Structure formats: C-alpha cells, structure tokens
Image (tube, helix red, strand yellow):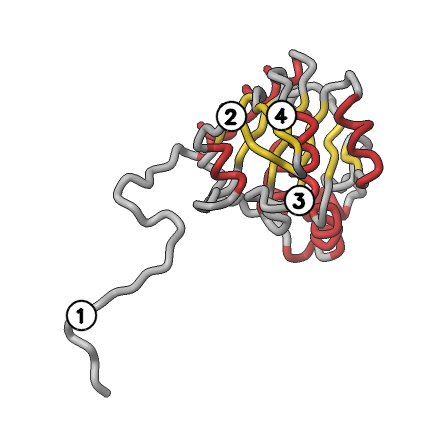
Amino acid sequence: MHYIKRLETLIIESTYGGFNDKHPSREETEALFIHDIKETIEKGGKVLIPVLAVGRGQDVLLTLLNAIENKMLPEVNIYLEGIVWETSMIHTAYPEFLSKEIREKIESGKNPFERENVIRASKKEREQIMTSNEPSIIIGTSGMMQGGPIVDYFSYAAEDEKNLLAFVSYQAQGTLGRTILDGQKEIVLNDRKINIKMRINKYEGFSGSCRSF
C-alpha cells in the first residue's frame, strides 16, 4: 500500500472560509436575537424571519419557544409559512432521530412543534396577520428572500419602523436578502416602490452552527 507523504493541493468547500469570517458564539447570538425580538414585540411590531425550511427553520422555532417557556419572551403567535410547517411535522413523525430532550417531549405528548401559539398560516391570511394590531413572529421561506411567502410579508412590513427583519441564514450576493442587508433603502416589488423603514439585523451565530435537535 502506498501513502501520500506530502499534500500538494487541498480544496475545501465552505460558505465561511475567509480570513475575516469570525462568528459570535451561539449564546451571544441567541441573547441578541431574543433581546431584539422582545424589543420589537413590546413596541407592537412584527418580526419576520426568513429561513431555510430544513434545519434552520426548526432550530429558530425551538429557540423562540424555549425563550417563551423561560419567560424571556411574551406568549405571542408564531406563524409558519412555506414548507417550514411540513418539514417540522416530518421531524415530529421521526422522534427517534432527534435529540433526547426533544424526543422525550414528543413522546410525552408535549410536542414543541405543536403548540397553540405555533400557527400554520396561508396565503389568504397574510394581509390579516400583517395589518392586525397584535405583535407576532413570522417564520417563512425562502431564506435569502428570492421568492416564497416571506417576500409577501416583507412587502407589508417594510415601511413600518416598528417591525424587524431578522436574518439567521447566509445571504448570497445577488439575492434580495443580500441587497436589503447591504443597506438599500428603496426597492421595487411587483411594480410597487417600497421604502424600507423597518429594522434590519443579522444573527450570524445561527449560520453553520445549528443546535442538535
């Protein structure tokens, strides 16, 4: 058997591979995330969270529910849109592949993905959700805002400074999410000019460091 004694070339695929790609810890990220959401809710605003439907959506949902359980957030409605709901139900159907903590909750009838304040929303309900006076949290696809329900919610929320757009996923160059994150204050959606006044923030400690659930 022959062994390679010297490495000539190493190719690594990585979203975060740059010299300056340093993320805060998960603990720091969660603390800031919950703080900003609490502040938004107390002002009567809406929180929009664009997510990847598999993994990131469930991670963020469990983080929010844990904060509510521990009285760090008030008991607000959390709306799931896009395939986030379906994906979460698949997790529920196979608890043996989840962490011991989540598996035990599901098996004891306390499924964290099925709570009164976790609501499956539909297209016809979006306007009602966004124009109501009640603060709420919307988790929806797509994660980079290239389409999907989150863009529709954004069109309702963007011009109200009480609202928060919380990025928990990487935003690639050329996507709507990246354009907004880079600070563009005026965009056109469906032939309508939108002046972005809502608060925009990113929480990089979620990306690439999903909790085991």
Residue placed under numbered mark 1 in the picture: 8
Instruction: Give the mark nearest the N terminus, 1 or 4.
Output: 1
Q: Of tags 3 and 1, which is closer to the observer? A: 1
Foreground of the two, 96 or 10: 10
Nearer the observer, disc 2 or disc 3?
A: 2
Give, as a three-letter code, the residue at label 3.
Answer: Ile
Are dots 3 and 4 in contact, CB under 8 Å? no
What is the CA distance from the residue labelled 2 to the residue labelled 3?
41 Å
Disc 3, SS: helix
Picture layout, residue 174 above or below residue 25: below
Going from N to C along the chain, the mark reached first, 3 or 1, is: 1
Residue 116's x, y, as percent? 82, 32
Identify the amino acid type marked 4.
Ala
Q: Quadrant of residue 126?
A: top right
The tag earlier along the polypeptide, 1 or 2, is 1
Rounded to the nearest angstrom, the CA distance separating label 3 from label 4 is 35 Å
Q: Quadrant of residue 10?
A: bottom left
Measure the C-alpha gap from mark 1 to mark 4: 50 Å
For marks 2 and 3 on the same chain, the one whose residue lies earlier in the sequence = 3
Report crowding for label 1: few under 14, some 14 to 19, many 20 or more residues within 10 A (C-alpha).
few
Q: Which residue lies under the disc numbered 2?
A: 185
The N terminus lies in quadrant: bottom left
